[in-house]
Image (cartoon, rainbow, N blue to C red):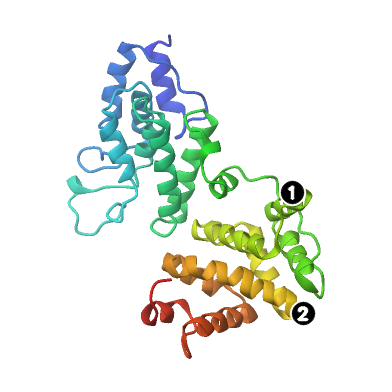
Amino acid sequence: MLRPSAIESFVQHEPFPPRNPLPRCTPADLSWLSRAAQGAPGAVVWPGLFPRTPAKLARLLLAAHGHFDPATVLGAALAAYGSDRGKFMPGRPREHRSYHAHDALACALVHPGISQEQRLALVEKHLRDTQSSTGERSRRKSWGIVRWAAGQGFLDSTRLPRDIVADLFPRPRRAPLAMPPAPRGNADALAAFAARWPRFRDHLARARAEQNWFDYPGIAEMGHDLFRAFACGCRAPWMGAMFEAIEHVLVHGDSEAQNLVVVGLFEAVQGAAYRAGAAGDAFEAALLPRSRDAWADLIEGWTGAGIRNLAAWRQHAPTP
């Protein structure tokens, strides 16, 4: 067992989340940590200050040893990134302040009283929901905590949705391939997308090898994956390259290649984008000029003259 002095050194010198594995603690250590934690996970430090790294690490060690009530920790983690939380809340008394409680998220991921299923649901909720409600720095921290928890064995990342896993553990970046200069037919359109999105390239090759690839269902599935990643905040280089590939096929492709984009890809994405609200509007805004025209023509064709974007569709048409 580590002596309290070693535990104190861990708390005082490690970053949050820690680089080294969590040490085991004795009852005497836990008593010292209770004082160092200065409150429960997600709680401000009296009189309304935000906990510093040593307090967060003390809370993390206590949670890993089951010190806090698991329901309380899970509740704090679920509310860690609410719209009412933030460092700068004008007019709020100091004693009622709150913050983006990364420590509560980390504590929930290590607490032995919180099941793997609850941890997975918590992670999926936050990694999807915080994309539009928190700043980039806060999002990076929450993703970093999840990545740390998976790396330390506290979270079974293989059970997370594959788009989240791909962003948590990105593969080494591969240089884009050349796109067909004038795409002819479905095969060239697919080649353009495969050239710009390595993960789709691998999926397409594997499905074809297994004789399990069908152009229109396959491109619809790709569209759902693309939009899901965009809505989760992914802005990796391949994302912008995919918008360029879509534009390339619509500008330089023949009618068959263009039809695969409009009927196969855009139709699949538009229903999800309609329901996604702001994320759908952001995807629509990211389309390049020819793509945006084709997108608008498709909406108008389904909903009526003059309705050419998602906002107008939501106002005048029933939910799909």
Number of marks in the rendered image: 2
> Would residue 42 be seen by someone viewing this image from the given angle?
no
Q: Is residue 99 left or right of residue 15?
A: left
Residue 302, how many percent across, how many down?
50, 81
Q: Which residue is mark 1?
A: 206
To which quarter of the image does residue 193 belong?
A: bottom right
Identify the residue shown where x is 68% and y is 76%: 259
Q: Residues within 10 Å of mark 1 (few under 14, many from 20)?
A: few
Q: Could you tell me which secondary element the residue under label 2 belongs to?
A: loop
Residue at horizontal 43%, vertical 21%?
A: 9
Q: Quadrant of the N terminus?
A: top left
Where residue 289 sits in the image (x, y, percent)? 62, 81
Q: Callout 1: helix, strand or loop?
A: helix
Image vertical order of residue 36 relative to residue 240, above or below = above
Kindly check if marks 1 and 2 are in contact, taking CB atoms under 8 A apart as contact.
Answer: no
Relative height, residue 43 to residue 266 (above, below) = above
Disc 1/disc 2 C-alpha distance (Å): 26 Å
Q: Local crowd at mark 2 within 10 Å, few (<14), some, or many (≥20)? A: some
Q: Position of residue 219 (x, y in %)?
A: 65, 63
Q: Amino acid at mark 2?
A: Asp
Q: Residue at x 70, y 45 (%)?
A: 172
Of all residues, the one furthest to the bottom in this rendering is 305
Tell me which label, 1 or 2, sits earlier in the chain. 1
Which residue occupies 28% across, 40% down? Answer: 75
Q: Nearer the viewer, residue 11 or 251?
A: 251
> Does residue 278 appear left or right of residue 209 in this picture?
left
Quarter where residue 264 is shown: bottom right
State the mark number for residue 29. none
Residue wearing tag 2:
254
